[in-house]
């Protein structure tokens, strides 16, 4: 999803040949479980990556949380595991990272259930929960997902690939935060997805964004392959997922903003045109927050989207809906 913008062709994600519906016999979604052990003998496993991501936001508050695993997890000297959290409100900003060599962790291969030290990201009875316990920042989240779950897979080149699974395209979230001796509580829109694959991380180049629009979500995902354009726009309702692939959808970066040595999109135009679907959406930077990646401060972007969506015979105009977006 960048330089030359590129996007994924969506396919139903079936990571294991034994999966039929994507749900195990106990009713949990296997697609959202860990995947490392199914690829641990790959000759390029040192380039393994997998993370679980969630956010909750409203007009004044937001939380972003990511649980990550990188490298050959069978070799503690060749892998990195950790949990990252970012919290902001009108007058506060805080982030917390839990990661160190030989950190204890657990991965569940039946459902979303990841523990890293005293942090946990898990699913119970169709809802998601996150417990983050940093030294100065503690967070508890409840996410009530809505929307049709979907996933995609793409080959970046001969051996590099990535998978993306959206277990909560949109939904309702509750957050409790303890920071600097104060306690915060807020509710808002929620999102959760899961990524994994084998690739040199600096070669993963993508654009992604998600925006809740009433009882549906507008999500885009574009990734840069070796010689092809991959990706597209996703329109998700409670029991329906509409994908408009690249060629019938497009993304144009209209204006950039410089953050030190980094450049990120300040304004983006996104379009999608297919049978019964017409979308024109302008995205503009609303806020940004610095996060730590690869031991460097990098901006994380929140945007406001406005535009028009015609879906079947219904025409919807929307203004300044908030969501997170990425350019990596």
Image (cartoon, helix red, strand yellow):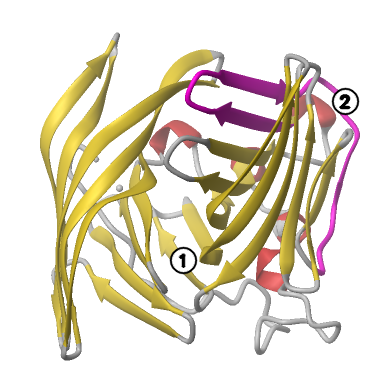
- Marks 2/1: CA–CA distance: 31 Å
Boundaries of the magenta span: 82-110
Residue 148: percent from the left, percent from the top? 50, 79
Answer with the quarter of the image where residue 178 lies: top right
Specify which label sits upstream in the sequence, 2 or 1: 2
Q: Is residue 285 above or below residue 35?
A: above
Q: Which residue is found at the position 88% from the left and 33% from the top?
A: 117
Residue nearest the observer in this picture, 68 or 154: 68
Label placed on residue 153: 1
Q: Residue at x 63, y 44 (%)?
A: 48
Residue 151 percent across, percent down from the top left:
50, 70
Q: Can residue 327 be seen?
A: no
Task: Please give the name of the residue rendered at 73% of the width and 73% of the height, measured from the top-left corner.
Answer: 126
Residue 201 lies, with reference to residue 223, above or below; the image says above
The correct choice, above or below, for 169 with respect to 67 in the image is below
Rendered-image quadrant of the C terminus: top left
| Residue 226 percent coordinates (x, y) | 29, 50
Magenta-colored stretch includes residue 99: yes
Tell which of 2 and 143 is nearer to you.
Answer: 143
> Quadrant of the rendered structure where residue 20 is?
bottom right
Q: Secondary structure at mark 1?
A: strand
Asked whether the residues under the numbered discs 2 and 1 touch, taking CB atoms below 8 Å apart as contact, a structural biologist would say: no
């Amino acid at each position: 999803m960048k330089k030359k913008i590129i996007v994924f062709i969506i396919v139903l994600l079936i990571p294991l040949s034994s999966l039929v519906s994507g749900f195990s016999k106990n009713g949990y979604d296997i697609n959202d479980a860990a995947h490392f052990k199914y690829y641990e003998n790959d000759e390029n496993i040192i380039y393994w990556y997998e993370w679980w991501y969630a956010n909750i936001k409203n007009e004044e508050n937001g939380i972003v949380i990511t649980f990550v695993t990188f490298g050959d997890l069978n070799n503690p000297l060749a892998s990195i595991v950790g949990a990252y959290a970012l919290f902001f409100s009108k007058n506060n900003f805080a982030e917390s990272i839990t990661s160190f060599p030989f950190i204890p962790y657990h991965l569940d291969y039946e459902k979303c259930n990841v523990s890293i030290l005293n942090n946990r990201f898990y699913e119970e009875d169709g809802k998601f929960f996150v417990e983050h316990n940093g030294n100065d920042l503690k967070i508890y989240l409840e996410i009530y997902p809505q929307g049709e779950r979907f996933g995609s897979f793409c080959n970046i080149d001969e051996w590099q690939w990535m998978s993306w699974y959206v277990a909560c395209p949109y939904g309702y979230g509750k957050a409790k935060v303890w920071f600097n001796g104060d306690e915060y509580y807020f509710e808002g829109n929620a999102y959760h997805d899961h990524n994994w694959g084998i690739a040199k991380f600096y070669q993963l180049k993508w654009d992604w964004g998600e925006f809740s629009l009433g009882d549906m979500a507008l999500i885009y995902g574009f990734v840069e392959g070796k010689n092809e354009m991959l990706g597209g726009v996703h329109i998700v309702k409670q029991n329906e997922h509409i994908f408009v692939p690249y060629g019938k959808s497009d993304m144009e970066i209209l204006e950039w903003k410089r953050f030190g040595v980094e450049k990120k999109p300040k304004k983006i135009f996104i379009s999608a045109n297919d049978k019964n679907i017409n979308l024109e959406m302008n995205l503009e930077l609303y806020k940004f927050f610095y996060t730590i990646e690869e031991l460097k401060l990098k901006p994380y972007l929140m945007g406001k989207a406005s535009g028009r969506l015609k879906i079947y015979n219904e025409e919807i105009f929307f203004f300044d809906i908030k969501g997170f977006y990425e350019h990596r």
